[in-house]
Amino acid sequence: MAELTIEHLGRITRATGRCSDAQLRKFRNALLLKEFRIVSEQENAWELRRRAYLLQDDWPVQIKIRRNGAQFEIDYYLSIPWGWIAGLGFLTGIALPFAGFQNAGLAFVLALLVMGLAVYKQKFDVRTDARFWQQRSRQRWGELMERLIQEAFVGER
């Protein structure tokens, strides 16, 4: 059996352990079936992303896989894309002054605070006991990723 460790490091969740080529391929194929796309592929490193489905309360997920011989390290987390943050900044600076709000100054300050929070909390781990920020999405992805990792690297429970 493989030794597998999953730890939540605040902004990311990291799984480490040992694997074979077949196990890593099985994990990658399972991610592709969950609508992940490979955005970067090197000899011993891959980066995968999944787009957001906001109407389904589903945030973008990013996964980085690194392998060194039989050792692997998988970092995964939910994220707020830079495009969303830039879009809010653009709307705040361009559209807000012409929106006709009674307290546009207050709305501007609130939008800046939201942008600051988004930059600060851009990455967040996916723990099964998550609270507060994106609780349901983090819990759902935490359970799903743990199941996929267990199935691929340890075998059926």
Image: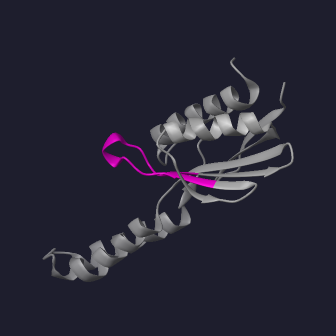
Whole-percent x and y of residue 108?
31, 76
98 is higher (above) or lower (below) than 70 = below
Magenta span includes 59? yes
Residue at position x 62%, y 55% from top?
Answer: 47
User: Can residue 73 be seen at all in this image of the molecule?
Assistant: yes
User: Can residue 129 be seen at all in this image of the molecule?
Assistant: no
12 is higher (above) or lower (below) than 128 = below
Could you tell me how many numbered marks the image carries? 0
Residue at position x 27%, y 79% from top?
Answer: 105
Please state which of residues 39 and 7 is positioned toward the viewer in this rendering: 39
Left/right placement of residue 59 relative to residue 49 reads left
Residue at position x 65%, y 34% from top?
Answer: 26
Whole-percent x and y of residue 2?
83, 29
Whole-percent x and y of residue 67?
79, 50
Furthest-right residue in view?
69
2 is higher (above) or lower (below) than 89 = above
Furthest-top residue in view?
157
Left/right placement of residue 149 relative to residue 38 reads right
Please state which of residues 42 and 84 is positioned toward the viewer in this rendering: 42
Q: Quadrant of residue 21?
A: top right
- Which segment is the magenta one? 47-62
Residue at position x 76%, y 54% from top?
Answer: 44
Q: Quadrant of the C terminus?
A: top right
Colour mapping used in the image: one colour
Q: Quadrant of the N terminus?
A: top right
